[in-house]
Every structure is written in C-alpha cells, then in structure tokens.
Image: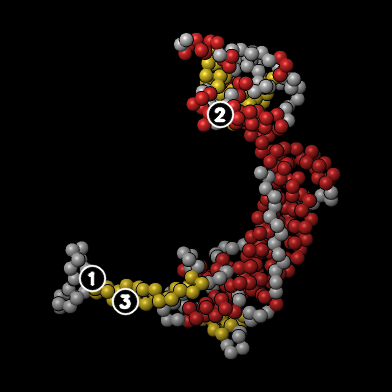
Amino acid sequence: MGALGKLVVDARFMERNNQSAKIWDVRPPQSIIDDCKDFVRKTGKPDEWRWHVHTKPEIGSPPPVILDPDISIPEKLRPSVGMAPCPLCSLHGPRYFFGMLGWWKEERALRVIGNECGHKFYGEGFEEAKREFKKKQSDDAAQDFLIANLMRVSDLRQFITTLQPRARALDLQRKRFVTAMSKKTAKAIYRHTSVDGRLKLENVEWLPIIDRNGQAVFDKDGNQAKRPEPVLASASPLIGRDMLKPNNAQAELLLYRAEKSLALLHLPNEDAILDALIQWGVDGRRSAATNLNEAWKFITEAHELCVEIQTFLSRDNLDGLATWGCDHRSPVPLELHRDHFGRFELRNGPHRIEIIPGQPEITALLPELPEPLESSS
C-alpha cells in the first residue's frame, strides 16, 4: 500500500470528536498541562493525548485560551513518529513538530495545534490570545515571587535600620577622602585600575629599533636607533576601588530608596498578603514585584558600597596606595603619607584629611547581608 493509503487508514489522521474529553468548564489546572507535556515527551504524539479533541473548530468561533505555547515533539522521536496533524489546518495529514496547547471555552475542549497555525485560522484574534498568555504568565510569576518574599519585608526594613548609621558614617569618610584627593585624581586612579584592579609602576627601557626585514635601524650618526618601551616594574592590588567610582550613589541614599519601596509592601501576616494580592490586580502585582526587586537591588548595592569603602580605607590598602602614589613613576601622583603612629594624611592644596584606619566608624563589622530573595522561577 502506498504512502497515501497509509494516511487514509491511520487513525492519527482521522477526525475524532472525543465527546468524553469535552469537560473543561473552567481553565484546566497546571497538572493537566503537565500531563500533556509529559505524554508528548514520551510518545511524540500530541494528537493521541487522552484529552485532545481532533476536530476542526467552527469557522468564526473565538480563538482559544493558550495554556502552553511549547508542546514540542522530542527530536529523538521525530524519525519514528513524524509530524503531528493539526486540528486547525491538517486533520488528515502531518503538519508540525512544534505545537501549543489551547482551551476552547465554548466547546469545553482542549486541542494541540501547530504553533504557526493559529494565526492562519484566527488572524489577529490569535495574536491577542498569545499576548494574553504572556500577560498571565508574567502575572503568575509576579504572584509566586510576592508570595515567596513579602513576609521578608519586615526583616529587610530592620536590616536597613541597622545599616543606615554605618552607611552614613562611611559615606562621610568617602566624601572627605575624595574631596581631599580631588574628584579628578579619584577618577584617574579608578581608570588606572579599571583593567585588573592593580596599581602599576613602569620602568622605561630603550630597545633597538628593528625594521620589517629584521634588520637593525641606525641614525644619521651611525648609532643603532632605539625607542622607549614601558616595562612593568610592579603591580599591587587596590581593594575597594569602586569607592572612587565617579558618580557613585551614596549608600545611605540607596537605603532610603529601598525603604521607600518597602514601606508600601509591609503587610502584617499571610492573610493580609493574600488579600493584597487580590486587591492589587494585575498591574498592582507587577508594580509590587518591581518595587520589591528594586528594594533588594538598592539594599545589596548599599551594603556592597559600605564594604568597598571599609576595605579601601583599611591600613594595608592605604599603605599600598601611599607607596604607589608617592613613587616618581606613578601615573597619578598622590600626597598620601603615613606617620609612625599609623595615621594617614592626604593633602591636595588647601584640602587635607587625616585617616585613622582603626576608627570604629571604619572598622566596625557591618551587619550581614540577608539571604537573597527567592526567585519567581
């Protein structure tokens, strides 16, 4: 029997109005969607899934609600099972490897269709169905994220309260240091260390000039021509270099922004959280998730900046910076000196600052950063 005869008698390519499967008065739960994906993963035949209705919807009927946009036949099964038939455009023949699961509310039916077939059958209505799916997917992720993390808002606000006085003190130390150094100098050092975070000193060596043919070049007096070549002499790490980053936000300001976002999300218990999730609606839930994510970002940035300032102003780090800045080879000369009491003085014209690395506002332990927020995935 030829290939055409096989298509005619193959039950996969025959219309099957599965009335017993038309039971879905409400949106099917995730377990049904997972069952479909698992069946296709094992068999490669979405059209034989027990809830699949293999009939063409009525012309002019509303487009389906998309339940999952990715019902794909596994690549390893494709040679043996071939393409699946599509209820929209190919009931009686193979059509697709990549499909999607839809729910036809009026029929109470589920169908797996080719992922490019919906637009041909429904036009712009199907594009709107895809947009609605993405909107729901985004809202589901926002709800999951908020449910997992809103109970932590109180602890995050307490952490802000604890870190805030330390952030203020370290911000002040940073401001005084950069002012005494000058913003121009701070920017130059930041750029100098941008590649590998190291303070480098170079010697100049005069090397013979060789032409493209490998021959030595001589000057008009018959002497071998030479060129200056910088050679790395030393490189020491500069820890906490982001303290010098131009236009860096203040740690205390970052904490203020975080507190402002969290104040709107402070709910006393789980019941209040569930009530709020309903009252907020789709837009409110998206906004709340955005605010919570931003608050966490501000908190981590503030804590990181405090760590940067603290480590930058440590004794060993300032020692290395002073040694480098006072060396005649330094590309950024710096008047930073240490006396025999371990105090540092930074001078730049009329500006000066004395740094005592052992001061509590510099060396006191910072509160430990809380555990990261749980992902919505």
Above or below for 64 versus 365: above
The local crowd at label 3, few if under 14, some if 14 to 19, many if 20 or more residues have their Cα within 10 Å, is few
- State left or right for residue 332 relative to residue 158: left
> Which residue bears the numbered disc 3?
205
The disc, 2 or 3, on the residue closer to the chain's N-terminal end is 2
Q: Say above or below: 315 vs 18.
A: below
Residue under label 2: 73
Looking at this view, name the residue that lies furthest to the bottom: 340
Q: Quadrant of the C terminus?
A: top right
Residue 301 in view in this figure: yes
Q: Amino acid at mark 3?
A: Glu
The image quarter in which residue 364 lies: bottom right
One can see residue 191 in this view: no
Observer-nearest residue: 333 or 297? Answer: 297
- Residue occupying image coordinates x 54% and y 84%: 337
Total numbered circles: 3
Question: Within 10 Å of the Cα at label 1, are there few (<14), some (14-19), or many (20+) other Cα atoms?
Answer: some
Residue 124: % across, % down: 59, 23
Amino acid marked by disc 1: Ile
What residue sits right under mark 1 in the picture? 209
Question: Residue 104 is drawn in which quadrant?
Answer: top right
Q: Give me the C-alpha separation between circle 2 and circle 1.
A: 66 Å
User: Mark 2 to mark 3: distance in Å?
Assistant: 66 Å
Nearer the N terminus, badge 2 or badge 1? 2
